Amino acid sequence: MKALRIRGGTPLEGVVKASGAKNAITKMLVASLICDKQCVFTNVPNIEEVDTTLHLLKQLGMVYTWDRPNGVLTVQTKELSSRHVVQRFSGANRIPILLLGALLGRTNEEVIVPIVGGCKIGKRPIDFHIKALEKLGAEFELVDNGDTKLYKAHAPKGLIGTTIDLPFPSVGATENAIFAAIRAKGKTTITNAAVEPEVFDIIHFLQKLGVRIALHKDRTIVIKESSTFYPIKHHVITDRIETASLAMAALSTGGSVYVKGAEQASLTSFLGALRDIGVHFIVHDDGIEFTKTEKLRGGLHIETDVHPGFLTDWQQPFVVLLTQAEGHCVIHETLYENRFGYTDTLKEMGADLQLFSECLGPTQCRFHGHNFMHSLSIKGPTPLRGRMIAIPDLRAGFAYVMAALIADDESIITNLHYLDRGYENIDGKLQMLGAEIERITLEDPAHQNLQDLLSRRTTVLSN
């Protein structure tokens, strides 16, 4: 079993480059299925999520070449060889459900996709997706064979442009509706659409491809039927989640970092929160410099929200950062009802955290009155201690890495496949900043005593 061995207590210092955005490139790969033209992507992160998506799309007929060291990926789907996503991809990620829109736009035949997967951070309802596609003329059948659940979809009369008013600005539902609307007859208007930077990047990619698409005011996206496409080259935007993660890792250890590729426009709410706790940063043309802060101050209240609000994927590492701030802070999670499950491990490491089912803050979110533990109080600063940790999901995984970097002794972190889904060469990048971190195999005799020691210590802490 692979694991990360981390000895904390060293301030991280230096320069590091953030990779391309996971949540942009994977969706654009799906979008490329709309036509038979070649698409060349640059700044592609070498992560498992891209690997998994490519393996899935290859099964549908995509041909690709990937220059991993240089981040260049060339893809083309001249013909669909299948319209059925096999069940083994059901829990891999959230890409299968997005294939509905793209495939319904490319073929008149029945499309079959398994139920959505991904990190277990709360329910990811897809009713917004289904209702949007139904408005365009798609018909669905949910097939439940016990352990197997999948959707069968087809558009017997073809897809017809319409107005889709999303009840919530869901990123996935927005993307699915866009992909389907590209080939729909006439014009489609999506209101209350998601406007995340990754959605912007997808729109820019589609415009290059030949799609007649525009973003209007008040979260409105208009797509007109498109039939002429072009081979293109597209540079993937920088990953704003990785950028913030690297910044917080350095700041939480009392260090500083220059993140190359960091883009201020996609980090506005994050940078505002950093200012509120006393962090100084300098925006340069090619990145952002986050400078050492002697004393982080508390008193911060954050509510996660859709863009341009505070991103829910920044929440977990920000909690770890706030364990090193003086005073009380509060984070109110408004997007996922089960996103604080990772905090039990942080408490075992020494963090002073308390969960609440109430909406702590000015906003009554959709979880109000449903007894979900979706608000968190953080009191700091608190020293953290190392331990044996199993990662439960992607963003919690980086939060645990941060906590281990703060701790003044050793930690062993397992379930690295979650971390590798979204962070390219994260141990290598942290090593560049001075972190004492290495990837090990726990079965190696050299590490067996350490494994036994940490297992005993974990048992003691759990009791």
Image (cartoon, rainbow, N blue to C red):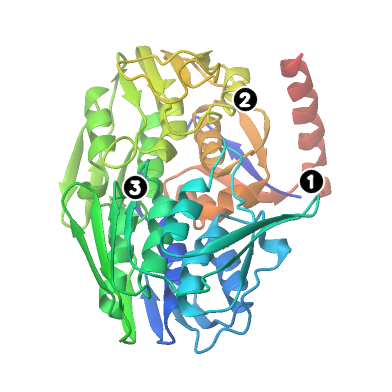
Q: Amino acid at mark 1?
A: Ala
- Judge depth for marks 2 and 3 and give the one in front: 2
- Up-down relation of residue 328 to residue 384 (above or below): above
| Residue 125, x across and y down, in percent | 54, 43
Q: Indicate which disc, 3 or 1, sits on the residue closer to the N terminus.
A: 3
Q: Nearer the viewer, residue 385 or 149?
A: 149
Residues at marks 2 and 3, CA–CA distance in whole angstroms:
29 Å
Residues at marks 3 and 1, CA–CA distance in whole angstroms:
31 Å
Residue 345: give its label: 2
Residue 446: give its label: 1
- Up-down relation of residue 420 to residue 339 (above or below): below
The 10 Å Cα crowd at callout 2, few under 14, some 14 to 19, many 20 or more, is: many
Residue 192: give its label: none
Name the residue tied to disc 3: 14
| Quadrant containing the C terminus in the rendered view | top right
**Looking at the image, can residue 423 be seen?**
no
Q: Are marks 2 and 1 in contact (CB under 8 Å)?
A: no
